[in-house]
Image (cartoon, grey):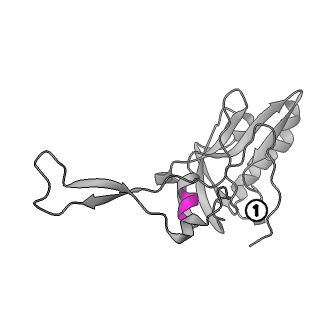
Amino acid sequence: MPARRERRDKGDVKEEKKDKREPEQTPVVKPEGRASDSESQTQTAPREPGPDRTIEPKEEWPSFTPGAIVRVSVDRSHWLGFGYGETTTVIVDSNRIFTPLRLDQGINVARYLPEDRLYSSGLIWDDAKKQLPNKAYLMYVPIGRGHVVAFAEDPGYRAFLEGLNLMIVNAIFFGPGH
């Protein structure tokens, strides 16, 4: 695994930590004959934290995705999405997950599809597969007289998906005119 690098927020573009939700409730079943008709046969009790759960850090990065091809939806009305259909495939090879921008912050030009339509090929760990859907892949942030074009992943990664070259070309050639 590559060495951890220090990460900082870039303007309104925010990188997310691992999604840490409370543990699920475990059903507790009462023995037959002890519950009255008005009582339910099952109740829920909090799950006891295991030894691994008690030593976990409070904040950590999502699991590293060692290589997966996933689908994103593209805003074709934006100049960065010029030349694309409604969806395209991209490569995920990191643990970077970015919170989508609000309308007053910028534009999410490409977003990962919902979980049921996200995965195409490769390996994504379960925690990343649950956190990645609907997050930002390509973001546009206007800053003063300039702008920031931010990719969650390297669109030219190993020159594997030639279709992503268009996103790079759009950013390089159309960017100065906007």
Eyeballing the image, is 75 above or below 118? above
Q: Is residue 82 visible?
A: no
The image shows residue 121 at horizontal and vertical percentages of 56, 65
- Name the image quarter holding residue 2: bottom right
Question: Looking at the image, which is closer to me, 13 or 88?
Answer: 13
Eyeballing the image, is 148 above or below 39? above
**Count of numbered marks:** 1
Q: Is residue 55 visible?
A: yes
Query: Callout 1, which amino acid?
Result: Tyr
Eyeballing the image, is 10 above or below 128? above
The image shows residue 97 at horizontal and vertical percentages of 67, 52
- Name the image quarter holding residue 14: top right
**What residue would you read off at disc 1?**
157
Question: Looking at the image, which is closer to me, 153 or 59?
Answer: 59
Furthest toward the front, the residue is: 34
Furthest toward the bottom, the residue is: 1
Magenta stretch secondary structure, dominant: helix
Range of residues picked out in magenta = 124-129
